[in-house]
Image (cartoon, helix red, strand yellow):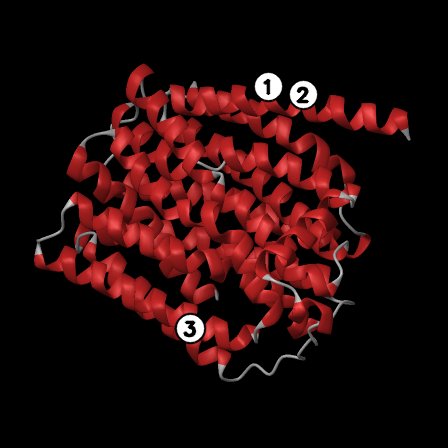
């Protein structure tokens, strides 16, 4: 996964730069990012039902193979010089459709590899692996984009999916039996059962409410950073890649921080107070004026949001029964990925109409404003109890 995710972050760095180069529009750039996450908004709940019913390893082989083919086709289009904006819209949508199943599938697969006792450590290790790649991938991408062109990033990403496919053949998970009653249920009945389970579990419900706000407004770096790097800081590809790496370095430290705390369980102060700090840091990033200050601020932002996301993921998984795991993690994916089209279009419009700084500033204000009603809901609920 580390090898594959390095490739993914190389593409995540190259694709927004390519989209902005083709269109010179922050709003059109945000449409590409939004389409990559739109399928999660539409189909995540259905994906959860499949995950709870079918063998996870077999489904992972299918999703990783499809990702390899789609990214290879994108490389061919860029390498041939025939790439057009609508090609990015199509490939982003197809990858988004595959990732709608792949993302909750990988999250649910962890417990089948390590069991319940080591689940929190495994989630922390998975987050650590992801954020090592987040730090390394953009740096490599920035250098390659400046020397070999953006097409190299797409080719490497395509080939990197082979690492996951090879590893899957050597993994022998402990299969979790599917409850007989779940098999007899219809798809919509099964989705409804999963949603009711979340609604009546206060820990899951409150955690997901916070995640809706953070995921919608705080995770739009693929739109905000390329626009800020070019319009405010005047950077080229390599400088942009290093800014993305600064974000990844902070995220890596955040993953290490959560891993160090993993045995003692999710910390409440991380779950409930880090989102507000993240909003404040986003406002600060929007007011930076130099490469160094922007990089440091992005590193702090990366630390905060990864510390929060890793803790929230752990909190969901340790409070979820196995028979609901696929459906709960599909809602997690719906929140994380499905909210991105809204957030991407929000910051794209802010950048387009009010300038490159406003994407960060407006996002930070939105996080703080929308967190307040959740605090009120929590205190009101606690007083009623």
Residue 60 percent coordinates (x, y): 48, 71
Toward the right, the furthest residue is 385
Q: Label 3: state its secondary structure.
A: helix
State the quadrant of the C terminus: top right
The residue sitting at 14% across, 47% down in the picture is 84
Closer to us: 190 or 165: 190
User: To which residue does mark 2 refer?
Assistant: 372
Q: Label 2: state its secondary structure.
A: helix
Residue 53 percent coordinates (x, y): 60, 70
User: To which residue does mark 1 refer?
Assistant: 369
Q: Disc 3 and disc 2: Cα gap in Å?
A: 42 Å
Q: Report if the CB atoms under discs 1 and 2 are less than 8 Å apart.
A: yes
The residue sitting at 47% across, 64% down in the picture is 2
Q: Earlier in the sequence, mark 3 or mark 2?
A: 3
Residue 304 percent coordinates (x, y): 59, 37
Residue 173 percent coordinates (x, y): 63, 79
The residue sitting at 67% across, 48% down in the picture is 195
Q: Nearer the viewer, mark 3 or mark 1?
A: 3
Crowding around mark 1 (Cα neighbors within 10 Å: few <14, some 14 to 19, many 20+) is: some
Quarter assignment of residue 35: top left
Q: Nearer the viewer, mark 3 or mark 2?
A: 3
Q: Is residue 257 visible?
A: no
Q: From the viewer's perspective, is residue 183 above or below residue 94?
A: below
Closer to us: 113 or 231: 113
């Amino acid at each position: 996964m580390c090898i594959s995710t390095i490739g993914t972050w190389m593409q995540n760095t190259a694709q927004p730069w390519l989209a902005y180069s083709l269109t010179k529009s922050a709003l059109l750039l945000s449409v590409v990012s939004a389409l990559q996450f739109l399928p999660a908004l539409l189909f995540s709940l259905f994906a959860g039902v499949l995950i709870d019913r079918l063998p996870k390893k077999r489904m992972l082989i299918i999703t990783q193979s499809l990702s390899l083919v789609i990214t290879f086709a994108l490389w061919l289009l860029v390498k041939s010089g025939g790439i057009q904006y609508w090609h990015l819209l199509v490939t982003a949508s197809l990858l988004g459709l595959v990732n709608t199943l792949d993302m909750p599938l990988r999250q649910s697969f962890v417990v089948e590899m390590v069991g319940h006792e080591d689940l929190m450590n495994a989630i922390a290790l998975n987050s650590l692996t992801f954020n090592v790649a987040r730090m390394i991938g953009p740096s490599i991408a920035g250098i390659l984009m400046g020397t070999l062109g953006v097409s190299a990033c797409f080719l490497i990403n395509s080939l990197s999916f082979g690492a996951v496919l090879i590893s899957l053949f050597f993994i022998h998970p402990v299969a979790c039996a599917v409850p007989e009653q779940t098999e007899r249920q219809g798809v919509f009945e099964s989705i409804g059962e999963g949603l009711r389970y979340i609604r009546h579990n206060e820990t899951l419900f409150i955690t997901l409410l916070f995640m809706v706000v953070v995921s919608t407004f705080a995770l739009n770096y693929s739109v905000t950073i390329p626009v800020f790097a070019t319009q405010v800081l005047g950077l080229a590809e390599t400088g942009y890649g290093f800014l993305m790496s600064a974000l990844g370095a902070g995220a890596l430290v955040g993953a290490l921080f959560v891993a160090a705390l993993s045995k003692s369980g999710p910390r409440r102060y991380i779950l409930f107070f880090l989102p507000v700090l993240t909003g404040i840091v986003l406002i600060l990033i929007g007011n930076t004026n130099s490469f160094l200050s922007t990089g440091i601020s992005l590193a702090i932002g990366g630390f905060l949001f990864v510390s929060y996301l890793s803790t929230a993921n752990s909190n969901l998984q340790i409070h979820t029964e196995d028979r609901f795991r696929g459906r709960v993690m599909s809602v997690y994916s719906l929140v994380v990925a499905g909210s991105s089209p809204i957030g991407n279009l929000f910051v794209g419009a802010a950048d387009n109409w009010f300038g490159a700084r406003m994407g960060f500033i407006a996002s930070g204000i939105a996080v703080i404003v929308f967190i307040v009603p959740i605090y009120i809901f929590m205190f009101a609920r606690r007083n009623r109890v």
